[in-house]
Image (tube, grey):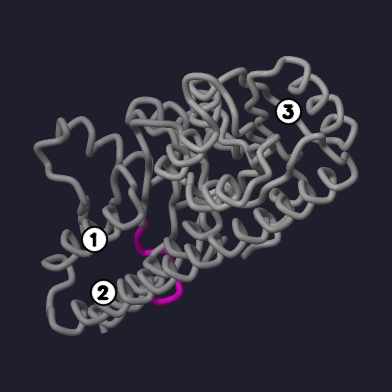
Amino acid sequence: MSDRINTALSNKVPLILVVDDDRMMRSLLNLALEEEGYQVVQAKNGEQGLAEYTSLQPDLILLDAVMPEMDGFTFCDRIRKLDRGDLIPILMITVLDDRESIEQAFAVGATDYITKPIHWEVLSYRVRRLLTSYQRMLEIEQIKAKLHEQQVWEQTLKNTLHKFWKCAELREILPIILGDIQHLLKIDNIIFWEAENKLLIESISASDRSTTQTKSSIDNLFSETKHILQNRQETIIAIDAFNQIELSSTIMSQLTELNIKALLIAPIIMQKQVGGLLCAYHSLNLHQWKNAEFEQFSDIAKLLSIARSSEQN
């Protein structure tokens, strides 16, 4: 996991959802938790608690077992069936201390159990322990997701190389390759462009565009951008809502005309010169490029550079 993800998780102030029909108990819990430095949101019944969970995605739930209409056992069972509800820690707080109630609490998915009257030091310890365990579990989930993403990407690169080797003419296979990458990275469009060979291949169909005017704008945009990259080989130009670089008014007007909200452009190096460009962009929604997207996009640009250079030799 990247340092940025670890920092974001560790710096986040935990949000705790307190679900209890007793207003005084909610107030006492709220006061005790806020003194420990946590954020707190309250719900006076199960239905409100479910709504708050769905809306806020808290880091911990403190739950009263005995409530009218929807008791804590039913609430806990329903939470576990919601999105990511299998992960969130639930600490049940109740006057019930018989064996049957305790077994029922764990059967419906309670993570831990504490009885009333509350021993506040014990509550503080349990809350810290559950939050720490939850944070570690989220970190593990992030690592697993990143490993899976890396495995999928490595397989994609292998498939791409295989297609290069099997096809004698790059322009025949490029639309398929660009389409695969577009789908995998969930990008609105990817374009391979070479001015000298008058080559412009897109991952979307031509029917999705007004061809003449739009391709003219793309040619103008890439011609301008190529000059920027000419002396900065192996560099990616990235523009999004959070990363604005200094570009000419001509380029900015072309981006507006093409309705491009987030843009990545990487050079295609042929004979140590910028022979073309690979472009990925989003036009439907604002997007912030991630480090993984930079790396993956750079990988594809390098593969295309190698394939294009080999084809010309």
The foreground one among 35 and 122 is 122
Mark drawn on residue 40: 3
Under mark 1, the amino acid is Asp
The foreground one among 75 and 6 is 75
Front position among marks 2 and 3: 3
Contact (Cβ within 8 Å) of mark 1 with mark 2 = yes
Which quadrant is the N terminus positioned in? bottom right
* Inter-mark Cα distance, 1 to 2: 9 Å
Which residue matches tag 1? 180
Of callouts 1 and 2, the N-terminal one: 2
Under mark 3, the amino acid is Val
Q: Residue at x 37, y 39 (%)?
A: 282
| Residue 211 percent location from the top left of the image | 15, 35
Mark 3: few/some/many CA within 10 Å (<14, 14-19, 20+): some
Which residue matches tag 2? 160
* Inter-mark Cα distance, 2 to 3: 50 Å
Kind of element beneath mark 3? strand
Q: Which residues are magenta?
A: 270-277
The quarter of the picture where residue 312 lies is bottom left
Q: Residue at x 56, y 35 (%)?
A: 57
Q: Main secondary structure of the magenta part?
A: strand
